[in-house]
Image (cartoon, rainbow, N blue to C red):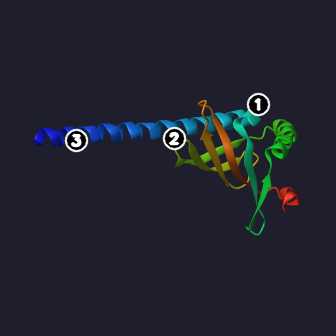
Amino acid sequence: MNKLIKKTIFTAFVIFSVALNCFASNADDAKKFFNRYVSAANSYSDSVPDFYSSNAKIIRQVVKPNGQTVDVPFTMAQYKNQMKISAKIAKMKNYKNAYSGITVKKINANTYQIDAYRQPSLGGDKLKTSTTVQKQPNGSWLIIKEMMQTKEQIFLKYAK
C-alpha cells in the first residue's frame, strides 16, 4: 500500500508540474508578445497593425479633466487609419510609451489579459492599459482587445 501511495503522489506531482509549466510557458509567451508589440510601436514599425486581430475591439478611455472617464470604441479599420496618421506625428516628436506594473492574467487556455500603466514620453500621468492577447491555432499571438486610457480630449468627438 505504501508503494501505491508514493506512486499516486508522484504521478499527481508530475501532472501538476506539467500543467503549471504549460501555464507559465503560455503566460510568458503572451508577455513576450506584448513586449514585441511595445518595441514595434516605440520604433514606429509598419508591422504594428499586424499585431492585431482583424476584428479586434479597440477602446480609448478618455480621462476628462474632472477625472471621469468615457469609453470610445473603434473598429480595427478606423484604428488602422488613426495609426497611420499618429505614427507620423509620434515619430516627428520622438514619442514613446514606457510600461510598468505589467501583470498577466489567464482568461482561458489560449487567452491572456495584460494590464499595465503606460507612461507617455512627453510627460503626464501614468495611464491604465489593458491588452487581451490570444494564441492562434497556428501558434502566433494576436491582440483581440485593447483598452488604453488617454487624456487627449479630441477622442471625445468619436464618443457615441
Element assignment for label 2? helix
Q: Position of residue 41 (x, y in %)?
A: 73, 37
The label shown at residue 27 is 2
Q: Quadrant of residue 51?
A: top right
Q: Are marks 2 and 1 in contact (CB under 8 Å)?
A: no
Residue at 27% over, 38% down: 11
Residue at 74% over, 68% down: 68
Q: Amino acid at mark 3?
A: Thr
Q: Answer with mark 3 or mark 1, whichever residue precedes in sequence.
A: 3
Judge from the rendering whether residue 46 lies leftward or rightward of residue 33; answer left or right.
right
Which quadrant is the N terminus positioned in?
A: top left
The label shown at residue 45 is 1
Element assignment for label 1? loop
Q: Answer with mark 2 or mark 3, whichever residue precedes in sequence.
A: 3
Query: 38 or 93: which is nearer to us?
Result: 38
Element assignment for label 3? helix
Residue at 80% over, 51% down: 74
Residue at 59% over, 48% down: 113
Q: Are marks 2 and 3 in contact (CB under 8 Å)?
A: no
Give the distance between the C-alpha atoms of the residues marked 2 and 1, in whole angstroms.
25 Å
Q: Position of residue 50 (x, y in %)?
A: 73, 33
Q: Which residue is mark 3?
A: 8
Query: 4 or 105: which is nearer to us?
Result: 4
